[in-house]
Image: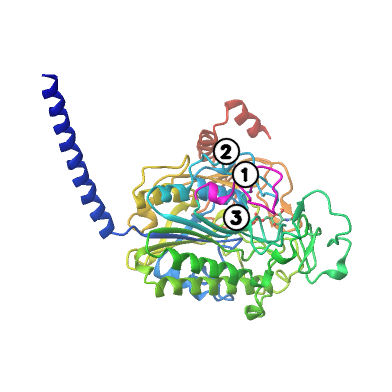
Amino acid sequence: MNKIIFLGLIAVLFLAFSCNTDQHSAKKNETSEIKKPNVIIIYADDLGYGDIGAYGATALKTPNIDMLANGGLMFTNGYATSATCTPSRYAILTGTYPWRNKDAKILPGTAPLLIDTAQLTLPKVLKSQGYNTGIVGKWHLGLGSGNVDWNTHISPGPNDVGFDYSYIMAATQDRVPTVYIQNGYVTNLDSNDPISVDYNENFPGEPTGKDNPEMLKMKWHHGHNNSIVNGIPRIGYMKGGESAKWIDENMADTFLLKAQQYVTNHKENPFFLFYALQQPHVPRTPNPRFVGSSGMGPRGDVIIEADWCIGEFIKTLESEGLLENTLIILSSDNGPVLNDGYYDDAVEKLGKHNPLGPLRGGKYSLFEGGTRVPFITYWKGKIQAGKSDAVVSQIDLLSSLAVLVGSDLRGQDSKDYLNTYLGKSTIARDELILEASTRTALRKGDWILIPPYPGPEINQYVNIELGNFSNYALFNLNTDLGQRDNLADSNPEKLKEMIAAYEKIKGLEPQQIESLELK
Ligand code: NG6
Ligand code: CA
């Protein structure tokens, strides 16, 4: 009797197993026939809403970005989560609002990794669906877990939060260490000339921008007066690593080449590439090929250079036959700034160009100019060319791309707007928290609520209006895109509704609401 049951069980198991393998192979055939699309995010640094031809710039020519904008979907209400870099990058990669993480602010080059290695990230989502994942360019999300030794394997870093391949600069072009790091190792490092980095104290005998102006080829305006690398004074002190130091004027070409190589090496299988351009962040160091190309000095020249890089990169996708199966998303991490710490003629040679377009504020600002950025989706043959006024945010890319690649994973604050990104729907994000250096505002429909914050109205150094008000400010973007008309007093009903919505998202207690109102 027992034997019969046993044999029966074996038969059932055998059937179940063979059925399962049949299903499995059917599924495998299906997926190998329809190859999953590649996903590429091209992420500029400090590129303004008005810096691109398609968005209205006439003095600056950006034909390659315009090709993406005119041949794809150009969003006029696309947002970075924040008006500075680190928090925006944190949000696009984690789908979590940066104000939930108290450390998500502009980081020094020695900061530990900001993203928890256990946290869900966009590259992890794609990896879970069989994608190879790569990042080339600016990181600025911290490395290691404190006291990084730059002379050995640097970890945790991008390769521990979902990227299979990384070729990065640690922080910004104006911060040390001024070296490239490939999969956790500083490239071209001579072990006899080890790197030391300190953000508090200089190393004995090392020149600085402050004390050695005669050594500078670019002068500092504010900050940026610590170690000198390639004649450019930086933020932070660095010693050693001579052979590993980057050449600023070659940075664009270097990142482009690595991005192209990544594509070529991974073209056979689905891949995700985060191509994080360093332009037009300071110090602006166009390759000699681009010097003078804009007539606007280095800031304009590096935008022309970035546009060229994007053109070359697209040519690679084209020649590899990948354009029809690749979704390209182009955006910027925050709004524009002219003088961000160096004398580089950005203000003096601006002429009629307006990097903000119709917006108010700029980088560091709670006004629209801080967070509303160029935002383009392009997919040859799949996305119909057009313009979209739908409110979209980079924070939603994680969950939307999860849907694209067939994953059930979702980010904490990230929602699925895939069809909006693909132009199949006009559904917009209903509520969006905007952030500028830990201050936050709310966009809901056409309305913007800016809570009261202490501090100056203008950052005098960069000459940007920050959006600090002594009381709640309310704007209607439909009638007042430039945010000149504060409707808080004349529209108390709307103000109340917006405050309630804001507090609900931010999760503040009622007492905190009162104290904010009284400020
Ligand atoms: C600021 C720097 C600015 C820029 C910014 C980061 C000074 C005075 N200013 O602290 O030059 O580096 O940090 O920019 O040091 S971001 O785009 O990476 O957020
Ligand atoms: Ca930036």
In the image, what residue occupies the spot 34% across and 67% down?
324
Q: Could you tell me residue 174's position as x and y percent?
A: 71, 60
Q: Tag 1: residue type?
A: Ala
Numbered label attached to residue 467: none
Q: Could you tell me residue 328's position as x and y percent?
A: 43, 63
Q: Could you tell me residue 314's position as x and y percent?
A: 45, 71
Quadrant (top left/top right/bottom left/bottom right) for the N terminus: top left
User: Magenta segment, principal secondary structure?
Assistant: loop
Q: Which residue is mark 1?
A: 104
Extreme-top residue of the structure: 1
- Residue 361 visible to an observer of this rendering: no
Q: Which residue is mark 2?
A: 100
Viewer-proximal residue among 484 and 149 = 149
Quadrant (top left/top right/bottom left/bottom right) for the C terminus: top right
Q: Could you tell me residue 374's position as x and y percent?
A: 52, 62
State the CA–CA distance, disc 2 to disc 3: 20 Å
Q: Tag 2: residue type?
A: Arg
Say few, some or many: other residues with alpha carbon within 10 Å of mark 2 (under 14 / 14 to 19 / 20 or more).
Answer: few
Q: State left or right for residue 347 relative to residue 425.
A: right
Q: Is residue 216 magenta?
A: no
Q: Secondary structure at mark 3?
A: loop
Q: Which residue is mark 3?
A: 139
- Residue 89 visible to an observer of this rendering: yes
State the CA–CA distance, disc 1 to disc 3: 13 Å
166, above or below 302, in the image: above
* Foreground label between 2 and 3: 3
Q: Earlier in the sequence, mark 2 or mark 3?
A: 2
296, above or below 430, in the image: below
Q: Which residues are magenta?
A: 143-162
Q: Is mark 3 within 8 Å of ligand 1?
A: no
Q: Tag 3: residue type?
A: Trp
Q: Are marks 2 and 1 in contact (CB under 8 Å)?
A: yes
